[in-house]
Amino acid sequence: MSSINTLIIGGARSGKSRFAQELAINSGKSVLFVATATAGDEEMRQRIEEHRRKRPATWSTLETTTHIGNQIQHNIGNTQVVIVDCITLLVNNIFSQFAEPIDASLVEKEVNSEISELVECMSHVDASFIVVTNEVGTGLVPANEMGRFYRDLLGKANQLLAQQSDEVYLMVAGLSVKIKPDRYSGK
C-alpha cells in the first residue's frame, strides 16, 4: 500500500474536519478516527456529539488526549487511513496538565515529545495519515504571555508536521488550497 501523509490547516470553522472526512471517505479504505477533544463544558460536549454523529458508523474511533502516536500503534489493526483531529486540542491538552505558574521549558519538552511520537508513528505505521490543525499565525497576537507561548508551540508543531507530510492543504471559507507539493516546484 502506498501511504500518503496529509496535513490540513486553517482557521476555526474553515472546513478542516469536513475536508479530512471527505478525503478519508473518497479513499474507500478503512478509517481510524483519532479524536483529541475533551468535554470541559456542555457546549463542547455538544460539539463532540455532533462530530460523532457526522462520522460514518463503519469507522473505528480512538478518543485520546495525549500520547496519540503510541495509542494509534496499539489500536491500528488493519486500518488503512488514520485521521487525527486535532493537533490544536492535543497541544491544549498538554498545557492543561500543568498547574500555574507553567514551567515553559517543561511544557515545550512535552509538546515536542508528543509531536515527535506522532511523526515516528506516521513513519512506521503502514497507513495514510490525515492530520487536522489550526493555523494560528495569521490572527491577532495574543494579549498575554501564555497565549503567545501556546501560539508559538502550535506553530512549531505545525511546521514539523508540514515538513513530514506529502500534502498540505490550507482551508479558507470551506475551500481547500493545496500548498504542498507546490505545483511549480514539486516541493
Image (cartoon, rainbow, N blue to C red):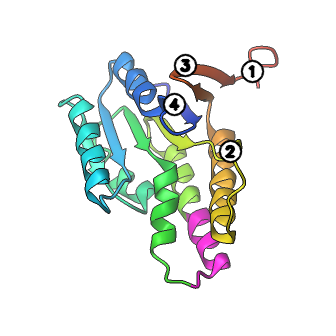
Element class at badge 3: strand
* x and y, in percent, of residue 80 in the image: 36, 31
Q: Which residue is mark 3?
A: 175
Q: Which residue is mark 2?
A: 139
- How far, Cα to Cα, is label 1 from label 3? 17 Å
Closer to the camera: disc 1 or disc 3? Answer: 3
Is 127 part of what is drawn in magenta? no
* Secondary structure mostly seen in the magenta stretch: helix
Element class at badge 4: loop
Q: Is tag 4's residue or tag 1's residue first in the polypeptide sequence?
A: 4
The correct choice, above or below, for 83 with respect to 113 in the image is above
Q: Is tag 2's residue or tag 4's residue first in the polypeptide sequence?
A: 4
Q: Is tag 4's residue or tag 3's residue first in the polypeptide sequence?
A: 4
Residue that appears at 58% across and 64% down: 111
The correct choice, above or below, for 156 with respect to 19 in the image is below
Q: Is tag 2's residue or tag 3's residue first in the polypeptide sequence?
A: 2
Q: Which residue is mark 4?
A: 14
- How far, Cα to Cα, is label 4 from label 3? 8 Å
Amino acid carrying label 3: it is Leu
Amino acid carrying label 1: it is Asp
Q: Which residue is mark 1?
A: 182
Residue that appears at 63% across and 70% down: 146
